[in-house]
Amino acid sequence: MNNKPIAVGDLVMVVRGHDCIVRKLGGVPMHVERISQSACGGLRCSLCGSSKVYPQTTCANFEGKKCFLPLAWLIRIEPPAVSQQTESTKELMNVR
Ligand SMILES: [Zn+2]
């Protein structure tokens, strides 16, 4: 298994956390744009208005989205293996 921490540029999705956010963003692939140590502590949920839905922890900020989410709520989506991409490219070249 790959246990590297989530980093900038990784493709991730929400799998746990505050209910509203899981319902809205759960399973949606997002690219991590920035990692922030403490900016998310005590932020308010924009959907239900409940405050302090985020623990004070390391958070990720996403490309094209104005939200910070704790890394603990996310899992990384592994990109397709490079060898598979190479094989399909070869097949395409053989056809021509
Ligand atoms: Zn909420």
Image: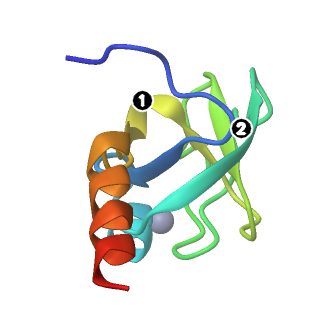
Residue at 56% across / 41% down in the picture? Answer: 10
Quickly name the residue at label 2. 40
Residue placed most toward the observer, 80 or 23:
80
Tag 1: amino acid: Ala
Q: Position of residue 76 (x, y in %)?
A: 39, 39
10 Å crowding of disc 1: few (<14), some (14-19), many (20+): some
Report helix, strand or loop for mark 1: helix
Residue placed most toward the observer, 24 or 55:
24
Report helix, strand or loop for mark 2: loop
Which of label 1 and label 2 is nearer to you?
A: 1
Compared with residue 47, is residue 63 higher up or lower down, i.e. above or below? above
- Number of marks present in the image shown: 2
Residue 52 appears in the rendering? yes
Q: Position of residue 52 (x, y in %)?
A: 60, 43
Compared with residue 39, is residue 46 higher up or lower down, i.e. above or below? below
Q: Position of residue 49 (x, y in %)?
A: 60, 69
Residue 27 appears in the rendering? no
**Disc number at residue 72?**
1
10 Å crowding of disc 2: few (<14), some (14-19), many (20+): many
Tag 2: amino acid: Cys
Residue at 35% across / 55% down in the picture? Answer: 85
Specify the farthest residue to the left: 1
- CA separation in Å, label 1 and label 2: 13 Å
Q: Quadrant of residue 96?
A: bottom left
Compared with residue 52, is residue 88 higher up or lower down, i.e. above or below? below
Q: Earlier in the sequence, mark 1 or mark 2?
A: 2
